[in-house]
Image (cartoon, rainbow, N blue to C red):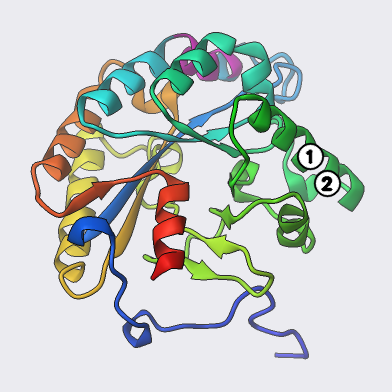
Amino acid sequence: MGDMNPFPFFPYEAIVDRPPVKWPNGARVAVWVVPNIEHFHIDKFTPSPDIRNYSRRDYGNRVGIWRLMEVLEKNGVKGTVALNGEAALFYPRIMEEAIKLDWEFMGHGMTNSVLLNTLTKEGEGEVIEQTRAIVEGLGSPMRGWLGPGLAETWDTLDLLKQHGVEYVCDWVNDDLPYRMNNGLYSIPYSIELNDMPLFNMPSISAEDFCRRICDTFDVLYEEGGTSGRVMGIALHPFLIGAPHRIKYLDKALSYIASHEDVWFAKGGEIIDAFKQG
């Protein structure tokens, strides 16, 4: 295997060996929903300009996000936004509504057209700082971070720590938060319940997406009777906000909301409760 430390960022911890996690009001599952509000550069697609792919994503900011907001509010869900800094600059109307809905903003780089692992350490630090300044300008600290494309470098976690971030979503390896070696917390995000990989080629049906959310919830809800669990649902307005898909998100969230002992929470709230034990 060589000399590489297999656990450079956090220790291995079997979930069955950890003390039981208690959520507020005896909730079995903390469910958090992450709308990715993003901005892409029309000249960064190949070939350029790629009208088809750019405009498909632009649909999310023009149309899809408003359907998503309506469905989340209907089901009592406050979103935790993975926010491209440029989205806040170019779509103030969306920010205005998200603030009104009491959504949380976490950093998601400046644009999804630039991944952190394509930058120098200095460039990466500048992106994190620029994003932090924009999130703070919306009225709250940047407590959480999701890398564009879930990309990191060897320096990312320490740079995030230096810029005041408390939790990171890139590590999709658990059903509970855990503390990383440098003091950051990882929070369960999802590729399994993420419309980006699931609705791109090959695409599952929207009905299958709904069933997958409900099936995941059923297992975590059962396990939550012994120790609390976290369930993340990752959404992109240009995908889930399409007319033929949105009702299936509504059905899934309505199903979850029909259960007792469920906590629809924001990312920072989950981390606060986890820290308190």
Judge left or right: residue 130 versus residue 103.
right
State whether residue 40 is above or below residue 213: above
- Is residue 183 inside the magenta stretch? no
Element type at marker 2? helix
Overall secondary structure of the magenta stretch? helix
Residue at image mark 1: 129
**Residue reaching furthest bottom?**
2
The answer to the question of whether label 2 and label 1 lie on touching residues, with beta carbons closer than 8 A, is yes
- Label 2 crowd bin: few (<14), some (14–19), many (20+), radius 10 Å: many
Please state the horizontal and vertical placement of residue 116, each as a whole percent of the image.
75, 46
Of the pair 42 and 107, the residue shown nearer to us: 107
Question: What separation in Å lies between label 2 and label 1 (alpha carbons)?
Answer: 6 Å
Is residue 61 shown in magenta? yes
Residue 261 visible in the current orientation: yes
| 82 vs 220: above or below | above
In the depicted structure, whether residue 75 falls above or below residue 118: above
Residue 245 picture quarter:
top left
Mark 1, Cα crowd under 10 Å, few <14 / some 14-19 / many 20+, is many
- Identify which amino acid the numbered label 2 is placed on: Gly
Secondary structure state at the residue bearing disc 1: helix
* Residue at 39% in and 60% down: 273
Residue at 45% from the left image edge and 42% from the top image edge: 197
For the C terminus, give its image quadrant: bottom left
Segment tinted magenta in the rendering: 54-62
- The residue to which callout 2 is attached is 125
Give the residue displayed 56% in from the left and 12% down from the top.
Answer: 55
Q: Which of 245 and 79 is in front in this view?
A: 79
User: Residue 14: x percent and y percent?
Assistant: 41, 83
- Amino acid carrying label 1: it is Glu
Left or right position of 159 against 18: right
- Residue 40 position, x and y percent, is 65, 23
